Image (tube, rainbow, N blue to C red):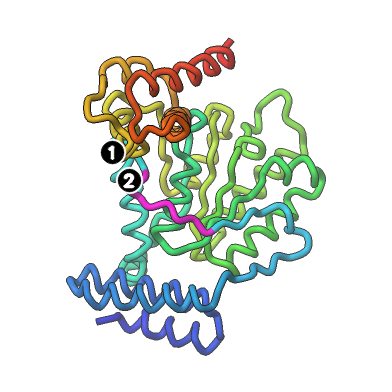
Amino acid sequence: MATAEQLKALIRSHLSEDTERFYTIALQLAAYEAQQGHSALAHDIREIVDRARRERGPRVIKFPVDLRGLILVEEPKTPKAALVFPEALSERIDRVIHEYRQQHKLKSHGLTHRRRLLLTGPPGTGKTMTARVLAHELRLGLRTVQVDKLVTKFMGETSAKLRQIFDFMQQEPGVYLFDEFDAIGGARSLDNDVAEMRRVLNAFLQFIEQDTSDSIIIAATNSPKLLDRALFRRFDDVLYYELPGTEDRQRLIRNVLGTFIAPTFAWKSVLGESEWLSHAEIDSACRDAIKHAILADKNRVSAILLRQTISERQSTHKELRG
């Protein structure tokens, strides 16, 4: 059954009328029961919470006036099955999910779960999707902090805005994604750096180290070499993303095409054509092929059609590379 700490936390959240906190703890309790082999009870708890959320309707997030427009709110429905990554990376994402669900067990031994993640890699390789998956799997909202807007619009008071964001994390548990993070995480020794940005980075380092919220903090960047080295040790885990290999490309194409894939499919030519494309580009090429098939009143996507849409993506890719 539930631990004493879980029961006390559940009662506190109910008495303080913190409904979202109550839901979060109830789902943690469900995860705990599932780990104990009580799958039917875990399923019933999740059903009760999901039904209550549906009846209650979308929750209106009350942002401080100064933060409106800086944080985008999303309730993702992307399951982990949608991720197509090498096994090693998938296992590390699984570990984040498992530790969050079992955080009470870790806390009873004076340990904390992984909740500060740095995601690095080329555009379109699944960093943002990982944030969506974590939010969905952990039953948390996704809050995307628009770092570029934070820096350009509020130059001179960015550190103060960062403090407000971290204070908000304490009040509103969720998955907080700092996308394009190199906008504030650039190395302090860069020649084009300015005193204000050094203060912003120092402030972020201080805030993330002192943060004690239940939120998951994710910083994502396409340019890890631009980041200040002091950042890396502030994160619990650093995940590296790469362009998909042959096996991952095949799995991704199968996942997206689904029942649209033709019974006989020339995989060798398709996989050769799709080399050097990102997950996002392959996904888009597959969806373009499906649209072509539907508009042509066909229910299958041939390898020839997919190679055509992939070729279009490759042309764009080559132009961008110069």
Residue located 30% across and 31% down the image: 248
- The picture places residue 142, in percent across and down from the top left corner, at 54, 56
Circles 1, 2 touching at the beta carbon (< 8 Å):
yes
Residue located 28% across and 71% down the image: 32
Looking at the rendered structure, the secondary structure element under dot 1 is helix
Occupied quadrant, residue 57: bottom right
Q: Nearer the viewer, residue 255 or 4?
A: 255
Name the chief secondary structure element in magenta: loop
Mark carried by residue 92: 2
Q: Amino acid at mark 2?
A: Arg
Residue located 44% across and 38% down the image: 126
Mark carried by residue 88: 1
Q: On the rendered image, what quadrant is the N terminus found in?
A: bottom left
Q: Which residues are magenta?
A: 75-82
Task: Using residue 269 as the reference point, say whether residue 112 is left or right of it.
Answer: right
Q: Nearer the viewer, residue 218 or 113?
A: 218
Tell whether position 125 is magenta: no
Q: Visible in this render: residue 193?
A: yes
Q: On the rendered image, what quadrant is the C terminus found in?
A: top right
- The picture places residue 290, in percent across and down from the top left corner, at 42, 33
Task: Using residue 316 as the reference point, say whether residue 266 is left or right of it.
Answer: left
Q: Visible in this render: residue 274?
A: no
Question: Which residue is outermost to the left?
Answer: 37
Question: Which residue is outermost to the bottom?
Answer: 15
Question: Which residue is outermost to the front?
Answer: 297
Tell whether position 77 is magenta: yes
- The picture places residue 58, in percent across and down from the top left corner, at 57, 69
Task: Using residue 220 as the reference point, say whether residue 161 is left or right of it.
Answer: right
The answer to whether 283 is drawn above or below residue 237 in the figure is: above
The answer to whether 111 is drawn above or below residue 84 in the figure is: below
